[in-house]
Amino acid sequence: MIVDDSKPIRDMLKSMLADEVEQFYECDDGNEAVATFASCQPDWVLMDIKMKEMDGITATRKIKQSFPAARVIVMTQHRGSNFREQAFEAGAYEFIGKERLLELQNIMKS
């Protein structure tokens, strides 16, 4: 499942991961991500942080509360602050800067 408020980013991720992933679910905010995860329970979630309605940290926390085995990779282009710490406190499997998205295939194979 790809959660990002930018359709071009979602499309790029789908293109990058097309050989590794059979089915994609797309969401453009955290509320939609929580609901979609509950109904589809995908193997992986790629979660942006900054989104309207509900941010990715809150969505990750809610997904992990209901589904402790969920594997959420939090991704962001924002530097500074304590996003990495917040992501892991929320239960993220991994945290990655968007400039390192090419590493996703290796992370998802582990």
Image: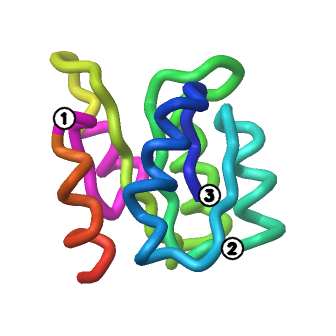
SS at mark 1 in the image = helix
| Image location of residue 41, percent across then percent down | 69, 73
CA distance for labels 1 and 2: 27 Å
Indicate left or right for 20 with 65 as reference.
left
Magenta stretch, residue numbers: 85-99
Q: Amino acid at mark 3?
A: Ile
Graded by Cα atoms within 10 Å as few (under 14), some (14 to 19) or many (20 or more), the crowding at tag 1 reads few
Q: Which mark is residue 99?
A: 1
Q: Is residue 95 magenta?
A: yes
State the image quarter where residue 73 is shown: bottom left
Kindly identify the residue that appears in the image at 48 percent across and 67 percent down: 18
Q: Is residue 61 left or right of residue 97?
A: right
Find residue 41 and name its label: 2
Q: Tag 3 or tag 1, which sits nearer the N-term?
A: 3
Bin the neighbour count of mark 2 within 10 Å (Cα to Cα): few under 14, some 14-19, many 20 and up: some
Q: Amino acid at mark 2?
A: Gln
Observer-nearest of 12 and 3: 12
Residue for badge 3: 63
Position of residue 76 measured from the top left corner of the image (x, y, whole percent)? 33, 32
Q: Find out whether the residues at labels 1 and 2 contact each other: C-beta distance under 8 Å.
A: no
